Image: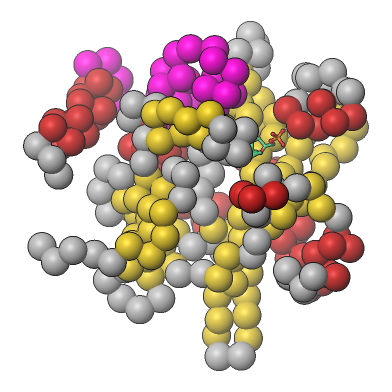
Amino acid sequence: MARRRQIYEGKAKILYEGPEPGTLIQYFKDDATAFNAQKRGTISGKGVLNNRISEHIFTALGAIGVPTHFIRRLNMREQLIRQVEIIPIEVVIRNVAAGSLSKRLGIEEGTQLPRTIIEYYYKDDALGDPLIADEHIACFGWATQEEMNDIADMAIRVNDFMCGMFAAIGIRLVDFKLEFGRVWDGDYARVILADEISPDGCRLWDLKSNEKLDKDRFRLDLGNVAEAYQEIARRLGLMPEGEEANSVLDFDSHRKKRGR
Ligand code: TMP
């Protein structure tokens, strides 16, 4: 098979040229980083699980009318997506205090917020993705006011949907990160949801025990990291039960051993 042209390699994913113009292939790695890549590791099987979990969520969001880059899953680790011009802003939606919000403002982790907060961070690794205000976005032209209105509207819709989806499987959606991109139709640009939605970029706590079932297990060295991602996939109905569950991940490791 002809080698595909690699377009971009990030910390957890690789983008390859797609089969048609305007498409890309998004490949999910097992690599994990935290604290702006100061901490590095691998979470065995993560790429397979995130590919499935993100497919599931993007498909459901598409079905309620949120435009996304997702076209279809191709195999265990890859999905076909629309090529977008990524808007260099990480959109963080918070329902419960945790992580950098708790640290910055001294609010106890786990405090239910009286209203949902949307924060923006400038996507720049060299600067450590700093928190920014609307004013910076407008001043430096990272997105137009109209685009920011669309982004905020979509973020709230995604949050409402995901809060319900996770509550139904006994999980509290504490916070999560979204990324958006532009697609061009002649001179007209439209903003759609891009990147991924997976336990890498969400805080997901068990409703009863408050157990963390997301990348904080890796960030904070809590152990059982892969198991937490599997538990999310299992509760979403994406894992075959029992023995078959292991074979989903084994299949992938066999492929790796054969050097594919
Ligand atoms: P924070 O509390 O560290 O700011 O993170 C808020 C949410 O955003 C959390 O669910 C993890 C996610 N996130 C990312 O996906 N990528 C990042 O680089 C950071 C810092 C956070």
**Position of residue 43 measured from the top left corner of the image (x, y, whole percent):** 39, 27
Up the image or down, 150 lies above or below 98; here it is below
Quarter of the picture for ligand 1? top right
**Looking at the figure, which quarter contains the C terminus?**
top left
Residue 55 versus residue 133: which sits nearer the camera? 133
Residue 126 versus residue 22: which sits nearer the camera? 126
Residue found at the very far top of the displayed protein:
209
**From the viewer's perspective, is 49 left or right of 116?**
left
Magenta residues, start to end: 214-243
Q: Residue at x 39, y 29 (%)?
A: 42
**Position of residue 81 measured from the top left corner of the image (x, y, whole percent):** 41, 62
Up the image or down, 29 lies above or below 22; here it is above
Q: Residue at x 33, y 30 (%)?
A: 45
Residue 221 counted in the magenta span: yes
**Position of residue 233 measured from the top left corner of the image (x, y, whole percent):** 42, 29
Q: Residue at x 64, y 65 (%)?
A: 87
Can I make out residue 209 in this image? yes
Q: Quadrant of residue 234?
A: top left
**Position of residue 154 measured from the top left corner of the image (x, y, whole percent):** 69, 57
